[in-house]
Image: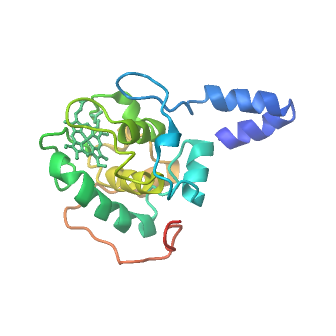
């Protein structure tokens, strides 16, 4: 939709399109301080994958519900997040990530969730930009979204099709090692 409006606005001029992008929510700010995030801090690898490029343009994580990304996202979650957030994101010393309640409501958007992971929040929720590549942040986000167990009506991050196909996460649900999809090839 955003792209469509942007496309239509190209008729008006590229400037209008860029201006729209800026006001369409693609502002990456620290979740707590509101300071603009600096992507120069990101790890040099995994910055320019097709997934990252698409995400930076649309603000929508292209890996959400893509089976080829979910397995990889699960592995990152288990090594980088579950110690604090629980095995299935049910909450531990960090809050639950698998329900409809967010301390920071901006985490309902992919841009917001990405910003929290990149720049951190309070207490032991440190910035992850030195731990995870940008592409890995998108992978782990896809897994966090997949762990969701509440009402799909409160999950604005899913597209209409994803909402239609939504089933609450079943503990123990697993995926093949490398099913076809946009994460099939090793991330650059
Ligand atoms: C060392 C412990 C620790 C690790 C590791 C950790 N977190 Fe957190 N996380 C926390 C704590 C504590 C908070 C609460 C911070 C706050 O309220 O400001 C939090 C908050 C969050 C929030 C905000 C939740 C809300 O309700 O708005 C998100 C999203 C999040 N973490 C995602 C992640 C992801 C994804 C990872 C793995 C890449 C991760 N965290 C790794 C401890 C951790």
Number of disc labels: 0
Left/right placement of residue 91 relative to residue 3 reads: left
126 or 96, which is in the foreground? 126
Residue 33 higher or lower than 18, as above or below? above
Q: Where 152 falls versus 187 (above or below)?
A: above
Rendered position, 52 above or below 116: below
Q: Which residue does the image show at 50% across and 76% down from the upper left?
A: 180
Q: Which residue is drawn at 19% across and 62% down?
A: 171
Residue 90 shows up from this direction: no
**Colour treatment of the image:** rainbow
Relative side of 175 to 59, left or right: left
Where residue 109 appears, x then y in whole percent? 44, 37
Query: Can the viewer see residue 86?
Result: yes
Report x, y in % for residue 146.
Answer: 34, 55
Ligand 1 - quadrant of the structure image: top left
The residue sitting at 26% across, 43% down in the picture is 97
Residue 89 picture location, percent across and down: 22, 49
Residue at (42%, 77%) from the top-left corner?
Answer: 178
Q: Quarter holding the N terminus?
A: top right
Residue 38 in the image: state x and y as whole percent.
50, 35
Q: Indicate left or right for 1 with 94 as reference.
A: right
Outermost residue, left side: 92
């Amino acid at each position: 939709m955003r792209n469509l409006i942007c496309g239509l606005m190209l008729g008006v001029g590229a400037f209008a399109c860029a201006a729209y992008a800026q006001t369409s929510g693609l502002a990456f700010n620290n979740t707590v301080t509101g300071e603009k995030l600096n992507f120069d801090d990101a790890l040099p690898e995994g910055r320019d994958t097709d997934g990252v490029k698409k995400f930076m343009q649309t603000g929508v994580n292209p890996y959400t519900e893509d089976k080829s990304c979910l397995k990889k996202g699960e592995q990152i979650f288990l090594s980088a997040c579950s110690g604090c957030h629980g095995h299935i994101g049910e909450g531990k010393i960090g809050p639950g990530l698998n329900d409809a309640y967010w301390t920071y409501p901006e985490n309902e958007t992919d841009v917001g969730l990405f910003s929290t992971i990149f720049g951190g929040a309070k207490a032991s929720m440190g910035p992850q930009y030195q731990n995870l590549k940008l592409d890995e942040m998108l992978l782990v986000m896809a897994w966090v979204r997949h762990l969701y167990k509440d009402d799909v009506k409160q999950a604005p991050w899913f597209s209409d099709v994803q909402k239609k196909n939504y089933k609450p996460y079943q503990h123990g649900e697993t995926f093949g090692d490398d099913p076809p999809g946009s994460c099939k090839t090793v991330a650059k």
